Image (cartoon, rainbow, N blue to C red):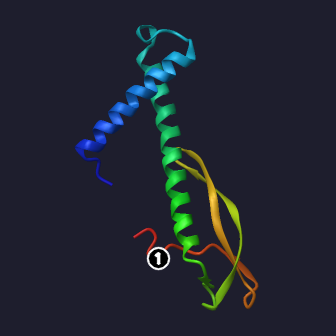
Amino acid sequence: MAINRELRGRIQAAAWQLIEEKLAAEGGPALLEKRFVEIEDEACEVADALAQEIMRLMAARQAEAVSDLGSAGCPSCQRVSQREEPERRRLQTRRGDVAWQEPSYYCGQCRKSFFPSVPDAGH
């Protein structure tokens, strides 16, 4: 995903808002008293939290799109499979843990549970 000028402007505005809220809430040293390494640590902490939330939202939206398809074919025998309760999915990413609800299906013929894939995922 390329970051165009408009999106970069929105990111900058959001960053200023987050900085203001973080400084107001922390009650620690004033901005002028912080060393650059402290500024970097705080920026990484906020950036990681933002990245985790973006990944969680995108994974949840993708799972909803798969779930909206209704039925799913078994990856082994291609028979239409029974939908089960969604399962909590958790991944360890470079930015930290990300969790969401993943649609789950069960094939009575193969006696296997599976998570249906998004067509051409990862391409």
Residue 113 occupies quadrant:
bottom right
Identify the residue at horizontal 52%, vertical 60% (top origin): 61
Number of residues whose C-alpha sits closer than 10 Å to that of mark 1, classed few (under 14), some (14–19) or many (20 or more): few
The quarter of the image holding the C terminus is bottom left
Q: Nearer the viewer, residue 119 or 20?
A: 20
Identify the residue at horizontal 39%, vertical 33% (top origin): 14
Q: Which residue is mark 1?
A: 119
Identify the residue at horizontal 51%, vertical 22% (top origin): 22
* Disc 1 element: loop
The quarter of the image holding the N terminus is bottom left
Pinpoint residue 16: horizontal percent, then vertical percent: 38, 26
Work out whether 20 lies above or below 78.
above
Pinpoint residue 110: horizontal percent, then vertical percent: 72, 88
Q: Nearer the viewer, residue 7 or 97?
A: 7
Residue at the extreme left: 5
Work out whether 76 lies above or below 8.
below
